[in-house]
Image (cartoon, rainbow, N blue to C red):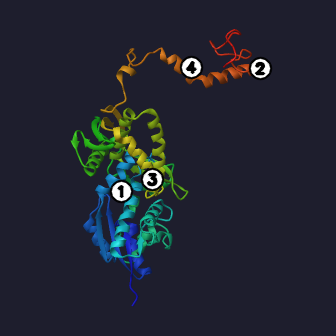
Amino acid sequence: MQKKKKIILAYSGGLDTTVIIPWLKENYDCEIIAVCVDVGQEADWEAIKKRALDTGAAACRVADVKKEYVEDFVWPSLKAHALYENKYLLGTATARPLIAKTLAVYAREEGASAIAHGATGKGNDQVRFDVGVMALAPDVEIIAPWRVWDLKSREEEIEYLEKRGIPVPMKKSDSYSRDDNLWHISHEGLELEDLSREPNLAEMLKITTPPEKAPDAPEYVEISFEQGVPVAVNRERLDGVALIKALNRIGGAHGVGLADLVENRVVGMKSRGVYETPGGSILYYAHGELEHICLDRETYAFKQQVGAKMGEVIYGGLWFTPLRESLCAFVEATQKTVTGTARVKLYKGSIQSAGVSSPYSLYNASIASFATGELYNHADAKGFIRLYGLPVLVRSLMEKMEKTGKTGNIGDGKGAAPEGGRRDAKSAGTAG
């Protein structure tokens, strides 16, 4: 008798993965191990485990990886100030490689020959899951039902479950496609597919108050960092998981961290999503304020380019690559002095700076002050500006010569010469 195929399924208990269990059993002679990866999403794991088993899974495992998610995926992204297309704080994109890693671990433990996931054939997550599994378990088959089954929509998925007498794990009227974890909640679908429509925030949002309904009084929050890692909120030291939860609660109450973005997916199309990232937005802002005083100009400027590239790499599912590791190595070097405290003011959806300090601050009041200090001589500026602006001056003089019809080299006595730069015949001897 041929042994049944063992499949590890990335299971969330949502609509897609609830459909996938019976579909796999109908299309493969298989035993399904449902694996729930806890990256901080709000979930009743006992109810989800029961749903998996009731739907046909042989077993359901729950892997709590919140600590690893924060320390090994979120903090490196924060320290890089990684953003995708200037808005997206990479909530889903940072979690997917860890989920792929966890699935690969379970595949090895269970002796499974395949890993299945519920990512659609139009989305980014199929890329992130597939590439992650390819990097960590290249010999394991990848099954992505959305790429091969006949179901075309969420409505057809609901009909599929109803025909089989399987409870639908959502209301038909609340069919946003959502992903949530400790870092964020994303929303896609429904009215968001019409770009001319405003998001229905009152019905959509889960952890964030619509800004116009936020408190009328601002709230001040103090974030402490050590080498780029946030370690305390309002002087209370917290581990990473507790710290993000605290800031999600505070920031969510004040309506901060909302992003409505039409983004360029990896597969080539544009899509629209609304993201809730209250705690993450506060941390990015505070971390950025600290870097402004702790990093020199050239390092800060180049790090902005690295952060943008890091955002593209993470978004594109390339976490387990030499490029991502190399970018992180550069970022780590820049964070050695990013230690201190940033105070921010939250008010009706906005985040504003309310002071920043660091023992490694490069700001020097005696230099920056309008008063003359020992470290800065105003007269030095003249020579610096002349050299700094020399290309501009030379081009301007060249254009003047062209207009007047003069010939010769600028400053050689035949053409135009900079002020104070003309030589007389006696002083223009032969060099040597």
Residue 165 location, quadrant: bottom left
Residue 104, numbered label:
none
**Split into 4 quadrants, where in the image is the N terminus?**
bottom left
Picture coordinates of residue 63, whole percent (x, y): 29, 64
Q: Which of marks 4 and 1 is nearer the N terminus?
A: 1
- The image shows residue 34, relative to residue 30, as above or below, that is above
Say what amino acid the circle numbered 2 marks: Thr
Q: Earlier in the sequence, mark 3 or mark 4?
A: 3
User: Quick one: label 2, few (<14), some, or many (20+) residues within 10 Å?
Assistant: few
In the depicted view, which residue is nearer to us: 314 or 352? 314
Residue 299 location, quadrant: top left
User: Quick one: label 3, few (<14), some, or many (20+) residues within 10 Å?
Assistant: some
In the depicted view, which residue is nearer to us: 7 or 271? 7
Q: Are marks 1 and 2 in contact (CB under 8 Å)?
A: no
Q: Which of marks 2 and 4 is nearer the N terminus?
A: 4
Work out which residue is located at the far front of the displayed protein and give it: 432
Q: CA separation, marks 1 and 2?
A: 70 Å
Q: Earlier in the sequence, mark 1 or mark 2?
A: 1
Q: Earlier in the sequence, mark 2 or mark 3?
A: 3
Q: Name the residue under label 4.
A: 386
Picture coordinates of residue 181, whole percent (x, y): 34, 56
Q: Name the residue under label 3.
A: 324
Say what amino acid the circle numbered 1 marks: Asp
Q: Could you tell me which secondary element the residue under label 2 belongs to?
A: loop
**Split into 4 quadrants, where in the image is the C terminus?**
top right
Picture coordinates of residue 214, whole percent (x, y): 31, 41
Q: Nearer the viewer, mark 2 or mark 3?
A: 2
Say what amino acid the circle numbered 4 marks: Arg
Q: Name the residue under label 2.
A: 407
User: Quick one: label 1, few (<14), some, or many (20+) residues within 10 Å?
Assistant: many
Q: Which of marks 3 and 1 is nearer the N terminus?
A: 1
Q: Mark 1 points at which residue?
A: 180
